Image (cartoon, rainbow, N blue to C red):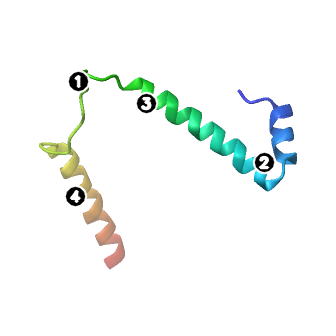
Amino acid sequence: MVSSELISTLKKLSRLDKFQIVQILISELAQQESELIQPNQSYPIWSPYDAFEVADTMLKVLNAAKAEDDA
């Protein structure tokens, strides 16, 4: 949880300082993300192919929205 003191301090910073803080945080996040994926490993990836239940649900939602628009 972020302390209210830290938030208060951040709000007092200049616009340039806030951008620099954001750049630092994004850089750190990118570094951590790159460490999650290891070379020579395989990772499962979900694909929308053969996701018939999802397609059916989307079609029902689209048809319901169209019916509301037509009403």
**x and y percent of residue 44 in the render?**
24, 28
Within 10 angstroms of label 2, few (less than 14), some, or many (20 or more) residues? few
The residue wearing badge 1 is 42
SS assignment at label 1: loop
The residue wearing badge 3 is 34
Tell me the quarter of the picture where residue 69 sits.
bottom left
Q: Nearer the viewer, mark 3 or mark 1?
A: 3
Instruction: Give the residue displayed 71% in from the left and 46% down from the top.
Output: 20
Instruction: Give the residue displayed 82% in from the left and 33% down from the top.
Output: 6
The front one of 52 and 7 is 7
SS assignment at label 4: helix
Mark 3 to mark 4 CA distance (whole Å): 37 Å
Tell me the quarter of the picture where residue 22 sits.
top right
- Three-letter amino acid code at the position of disc 4: Leu
The front one of 67 and 40 is 40
- Three-letter amino acid code at the position of disc 2: Asp
Q: Are marks 3 and 2 in contact (CB under 8 Å)?
A: no
The residue wearing badge 4 is 59
Q: Are marks 3 and 4 in contact (CB under 8 Å)?
A: no
Q: Are marks 4 and 1 in contact (CB under 8 Å)?
A: no
Camera sees residue 13: yes
Q: Are marks 3 and 1 in contact (CB under 8 Å)?
A: no
Q: Nearer the viewer, mark 3 or mark 4?
A: 3
Mark 3 to mark 1 CA distance (whole Å): 15 Å
Residue 45 as seen in the image, left or right of residue 36: left
